[in-house]
Image (cartoon, rainbow, N blue to C red):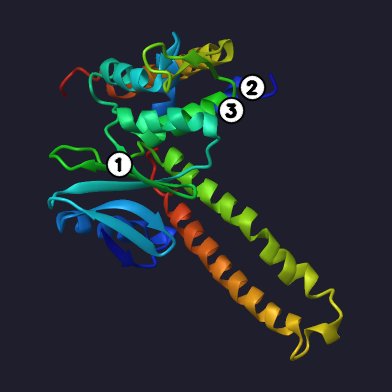
């Protein structure tokens, strides 16, 4: 690979969640639904951002198109590549460092101070 | 059918949206866009939300693109060049944006700027290279190139103005510490 993982980091929240929802093959509409569920309704992906992020992920070979949806041929299915999975893991490490540091400085976020 | 002639530009997108939404309240739904010309269809007055996107799509990607908008509740009102006019009925709690973050919003204007530079290339080429290297006698009054040069310079200035206005819109999207 020409580009190293670090150059993609940090991902935007939208890109991270889109990539994460594509560990298994899914189409755009499925991504919207899955991300909304995973984030407990907090992240509602807008169409322009969804398409833009998917295009970027495709261009950087972090995801690939793996065919059309059987029930609706207009919907393409996408899936994360091994590079994409590697990037998710890299991000998880980065986020966990942020989480640890945050807890050290201001305490647990569930406590009411 | 109602046709309204109105010249609105990409850097005045908010005004264009405002105009389209006001027309909907007055009972006119957008069906067609041409340069400086909007065609409406009479409907019941209602609140419609409009959004504009600019993309250069390969034909094979367009279905997927439009399906994502459709799945998010948007209808394509009209496609004009690389511009896609989307609309949906207004309801409370509706999220009218088609972007979640600056990153993807900027991408839209980046594509627009790139498109302008490519289409404007012949103009800049003529002003910067063709005319300066031309036989000066050809450029004197009342030769063809005398008038031609004036027209080209006028168009180049307008083009440059458009580029600057859009670059300003693009730059404004950079501020803020959140994504």
Q: Quarter of the image holding residue B35?
A: bottom left
- Where is B174 relative to B1, above or below? above
**Furthest residue in direction right, as rendered:** B135
Label 3, label 1: how many angstroms apart (C-alpha)?
24 Å
Q: In which chain is the residue bearing label 3? A: A
State the image coordinates of residue A55 (x, y, percent, origin top left). 51, 30
- In the visual, does A49 lie left or right of A110? right
Label 3, secondary structure: give it.
helix
Which dot marks residue B43? Answer: none
Which residue is depicted at the point 73% across and 84% down? B146
> Which one is in front, A65 or B23?
B23
Which residue carries the number 3 mark? A59
**Furthest residue in direction top, as rendered:** A24
Label 2, secondary structure: give it.
loop
Tags 2 and 3 in contact by the CB under 8 Å rule?
no
Label 1, secondary structure: give it.
loop
Look at the image and tell me in which quarter the N terminus of chain B lies: bottom left
């Amino acid at each position: 690979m020409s580009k190293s993982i670090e150059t993609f980091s940090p991902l935007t929240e939208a890109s991270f969640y889109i990539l994460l929802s594509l560990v298994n093959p899914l189409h755009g509409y499925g991504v919207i639904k899955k991300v909304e569920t995973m984030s407990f309704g907090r992240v509602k992906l807008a169409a322009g951002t969804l398409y833009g992020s998917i295009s970027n992920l495709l261009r950087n070979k972090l995801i690939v198109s793996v065919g059309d949806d059987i029930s609706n041929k207009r919907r393409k299915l996408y899936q994360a590549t091994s590079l994409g999975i590697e990037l998710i893991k890299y991000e998880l490490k980065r986020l966990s460092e942020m989480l640890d540091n945050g807890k050290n400085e201001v305490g647990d976020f569930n406590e009411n101070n | 059918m109602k046709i309204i002639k109105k010249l609105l530009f990409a850097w005045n997108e908010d005004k264009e949206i405002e105009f389209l939404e006001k027309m909907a309240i007055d009972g006119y739904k957008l069906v067609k866009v041409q340069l400086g010309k909007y065609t409406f269809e009479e409907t019941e007055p209602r609140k419609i939300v409009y959004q504009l996107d600019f993309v250069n799509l390969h034909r094979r990607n367009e279905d997927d693109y439009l399906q994502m908008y459709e799945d998010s509740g948007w209808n394509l009102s009209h496609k004009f060049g690389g511009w896609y006019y989307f609309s949906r009925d207004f309801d409370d709690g509706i999220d009218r944006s088609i972007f979640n973050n600056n990153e993807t919003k900027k991408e839209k204007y980046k594509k627009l700027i790139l498109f302008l530079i490519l289409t404007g290339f012949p103009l800049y080429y003529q002003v910067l290279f063709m005319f300066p290297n031309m036989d000066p006698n050809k450029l004197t009054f009342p030769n063809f190139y005398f008038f031609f040069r004036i027209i080209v310079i006028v168009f180049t200035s307008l083009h440059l103005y458009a580029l600057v206005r859009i670059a300003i819109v693009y730059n404004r999207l950079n501020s803020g510490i959140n994504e």
